Image (spheres, rainbow, N blue to C red):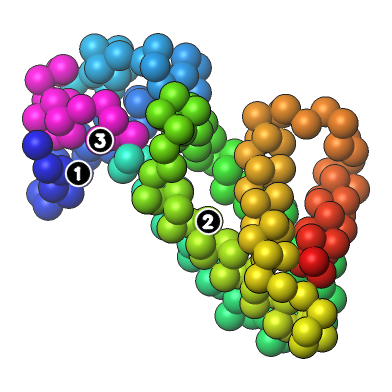
Amino acid sequence: MSYKPPIQHRAKVTEEKFLSAFDELMRENGFEQTTVDEIAQRAGLTRASFLARFGSKEQALLILYSRYCDRATKTMYKFMDELPLETDMLMVLENMSKQLLVLVVRDLSSNRAMHEHFLKNLETHDLTKGIFRTCVQMMTAVQNRFLEPGSFTANGAWSAAQLLVTIEFNSALQGMPGLPQDTNARHRLVAEILALALQK
């Protein structure tokens, strides 16, 4: 079954109820442990209605994750648009760290589920590849704005993108207790790490 976004208001409301319930349950129990019956019960709707709307739990997850990807992509393009006005690379990188963490925390359930999918299947979804390419593009733009030509390579942008995504995801999971507890100090440290990677 191929998913079709709802058009009528009632169908949109139904979809949002299901997705909100699904997100809550994934936060509580994770993707694998969440069942369609539980989603329907939490939403106050029926299993049949869920399957008619999405076809599967996996499809509903992709809708949630694609929303995160859209928000993150818009945020990264906004950073790139504003780069010509910026004068402090570390401040830019620090703000990137702060804003990406906010986005990941907001959509932690779908991010975690997609990470579990990767670990289980050793396969990166196209949505993840797309958002990572945009992150590399953003890091390349930072290199071009602040670093001397010839003093950096494309590998530096890839490294910085991978570090940013990995650190913020694990921070959202509270899985990096070795980083400073002070929020500003932590984001500043991340910025300094990214700056070093960008110069490679």
Residue occupying the point 16% across, 17% down: 47
Whether the residues at callouts 2 and 1 have beta carbons within 8 Å, the answer is no
Labels in figure, total: 3
Q: Earlier in the sequence, mark 2 or mark 1?
A: 1
Q: Secondary structure at mark 2?
A: helix
In the image, residue 49 above or below residue 151: above
List the residue tagged with mark 1. Answer: 12
Closer mark to the observer between disc 2 and disc 3: 2
In the image, residue 190 above or below residue 119: below
Q: Secondary structure at mark 3?
A: helix
Residue 53 falls left or right of residue 118: left
The one nearer the camera, 74 or 194, is: 194
Magenta portion: prevailing SS class = helix
Residue stretch rendered in magenta on the structure: 46-61
Q: Three-letter amino acid code at disc 3?
A: Gln
Is 150 inside the magenta-drawn segment?
Answer: no
Residue 74, given in percent of the width and then of the height, sits at 49, 65
Residue 171 falls left or right of residue 44: right
Which numbered circle lies on residue 132? Answer: 2
Quadrant housing the C terminus? bottom right
List the residue tagged with mark 3. Answer: 59
Residue 154, given in percent of the width and then of the height, sits at 66, 70
The CA distance from mark 2 to mark 3 is 21 Å
Residue occupying the point 53% across, 56% down: 132
The one nearer the camera, 200 or 74, is: 200
Residue occupying the point 83% across, 28% down: 177
**Quarter of the view holding residue 89:** bottom right
Q: Three-letter amino acid code at disc 2?
A: Phe
Residue 25, given in percent of the width and then of the height, sits at 42, 20
Residue 48 falls left or right of residue 178: left
Q: Earlier in the sequence, mark 2 or mark 3?
A: 3
